[in-house]
Amino acid sequence: MRITQGTFSFLPDLTDDEITAQIGYALGHGWPCAVEFTDDPHPRNTYWEMWGMPMFDLADPAGVLAEVNACREAHPEHYVRVNAYDASLGRQTVALSFLVQRPTAEPGFRLDRAEGADRRIGYTVHSYATERPSGTRYPVPGGHQGNGRAAH
């Protein structure tokens, strides 16, 4: 199953040149970027781990791409995304968000149905990835399982 979250998620994975172009677009609009990662891609999990600090003073897309690549190297089997923030309305709003890395295998989700009182039916989404503890949800190439944290 291919997770479709954020801009461009229905397209093939972006190349580094395409990622750099999108970062350049964001920076050109005055939107600072931040890099985040997770091993729990549930649609309601909006709070991913932040890689470093948001890059409010960075104007060069190559600097953001360097942070993307550092995060990819530290977390080779996690989802990694770039968020671009627009503060023009007096509050931080995500103006652009897109995935720049996926795990080799994406286990997907199932839809659980629950029947309640008065014939009400509710549904929840269950991520198969969360059946394993955080940090061991996706196998790392070479067999090593990390703890999901980066030293930086």
Image (cartoon, grey):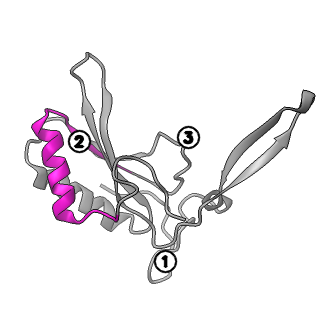
Please identify the quarter of the rendering in which residue 9 is found: bottom left
> Picture coordinates of residue 90 (x, y %)?
26, 16
Q: Is residue 116 found inside the magenta-colored segment of the image?
A: no
Please give the name of the residue rendered at 23% of the width and 66% of the height, measured from the top-left corner.
Answer: 15
Q: Residue furthest bottom?
A: 142
The residue that mark 1 highlights is 144
Q: CA distance from mark 1 to mark 2?
A: 31 Å
Q: The disc labelled 3 sits on which kind of residue?
A: Arg
Please identify the quarter of the rendering in which residue 137 is found: bottom right
The residue that mark 2 highlights is 33
Please give the name of the residue rendered at 11% of the width and 55% of the height, measured from the top-left corner.
Answer: 62
> Picture coordinates of residue 135 (x, y %)?
53, 61
Q: Quadrant of the C terminus?
A: bottom left
> Picture coordinates of residue 31 (x, y %)?
19, 34
The residue that mark 3 highlights is 44
Please give the name of the residue rendered at 34% of the width and 47% of the height, measured from the top-left corner.
Answer: 7
